[in-house]
Image: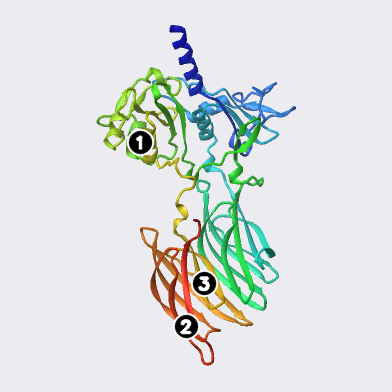
Amino acid sequence: MARIICLAWLALALWAQASVTAGWKVPSSQVVYSLGDDPNVPKLENPPGESAFFQSGDELWDLSQIVSHRIFMEGGELGVIPDWPGEWVVWNARSGMVVARGSESDLLLVQGALELPQLEYELRAKLELVAGGEKIARSISQIIQSGIEASAKSGDLELKLLPTSSSSSSWIDLTIDTKWTENGVSWEYTSTLLIPDGRRVRIASHASNGEQWELFLTITQELPDGTKRSETRCREASGGLENWPLPAGWKESAREPFHHGLQLGVLQIDDWEVPADLIEKSLQGTNPDGIAKIAAPAELARWIKGDCHDLTPFFREQGVPLDRTGTKVIFDPGWQRVIVLGSEEDLELVEFLFGIDRNISQDDTGRDCLWIELSQSEKIWGLACRSGSTAKLSGKGGTEGNSLELEPILGGSGRIAGLAYCLGLSSGSSELLSKTILILDVPQNLGGFMLPGQAEEEIEVTLKTLFP
């Protein structure tokens, strides 16, 4: 019986520390200033293990000491900097990647040491005009930088952009002004948008008498060597490599099964939010009421080195149950992370307080990005816009002489919006200017008119989310 129990505990221990191999594409300067000159970064004669990240002849450098020194808060009662707890971490000069093997929590330490939020990304903008439903009639692309106005022109296709982005977000805020000519009509579209990194977004469209066009914009965050932000991180799977996208805002946690049916959660808090003042006091060595300074619990010795702070009472006050035997929340000032030992509900609530939600595949940053479609008889216009900002689409020449100026204000529920509109239609002979209330995905008749010798025409508008 004792043998069976020991084997069961061994199996649980192995399960809890299942290893993962991952790689990060970063500039070498993000790792070490000068390879070969730093005694803490020795060159390896052989790969530390078998991995799809390695090839014969790779130049590999051991980064384990660099990771430990960058992450652990020096000083304090511990006196020495503990070794990084993972299996190995190296710099592969051929692929330009940091490659590491360890548990998910070990890999988060490596990721923290790389200081990825400080990476400088450029932006690659591409504008495409699609005619006839599928054929790309014209396109234009260029490298641009956040905070700097950029312009490009190719024939009659003109583009002006002013983007704002950061390495900690996968969304790009921008203003756009673009002009072009299609079927003898001169078009202009201006708007303020928020679009996700690397996604091809339809920003304007028009259909009339069997002819149609659509305008698409793609903004991609890239490192100077052309590596896309979405491809910065990958991991080994089934003998090959798969993309492992970085989370929005770099908010991430690792979970590992623990004994007695508990889950272990590890939260890196380089950019902490909740409870900010509590964590700051802990870092300063002060001892808030109810926050005890304790030795690392024996069962968490692998994850915590030295003294730590027991945050369990604080999180219970915040509504986290933590009611099962052995549950606790610990702040480790050395590795700057929070360790949660509890039920799945406990982990989800603590993660929620730190702004981490594992139950959604994409954050709701773009919830105020809208698509407005306006129809008049056989003509349909569509344009992307943002709540609280004005979007304009105008076409002049041939049978067109129309202009749309729209400003939606999305309500708190996200289902109802106010819309201020100024419409110049029927080659400018008719105009509608007012405000209305729209329900998402429900068409509304704005009004209509009848010109001499023509049938009465009605104007219908429909509001949709740009990123459903």
Q: Nearer the viewer, residue 67 or 252?
A: 252
CA gap, disc 1 and disc 3: 47 Å
At which x and y percent is residue 247? 51, 42
Query: On residue 431, which mark appears?
Result: 2
- The three-letter amino acid code for the residue at tag 1 is Glu
Q: Amino acid at mark 2?
A: Glu
Measured Cα–Cα span from mark 2 to mark 1: 59 Å
Up/down of 356 relative to 127, above or below: above
Residue 195 badge: none
Q: Which residue is mark 3?
A: 392
Label located before the other in sequence (1 or 3): 1
Q: Residue at x 40, y 19 (%)?
A: 299
Question: Dot 2, crowdedness within 10 Å: few (<14), some or many (≥20)?
Answer: some
- Residue 144: x and y in percent read 61, 56
Q: Residue 61 at x, y = what percent?
A: 65, 27
State which tag comes first along the sequence, 3 or 2: 3
Dot 2 falls on a residue whose secondary structure is strand
Left or right of residue 255: residue 133: right
Q: Which residue is mark 1?
A: 280
Q: Residue type at mark 3?
A: Lys
- Compare marks 2 and 1 and give the one earlier in the sequence: 1
| SS at badge 1 | helix
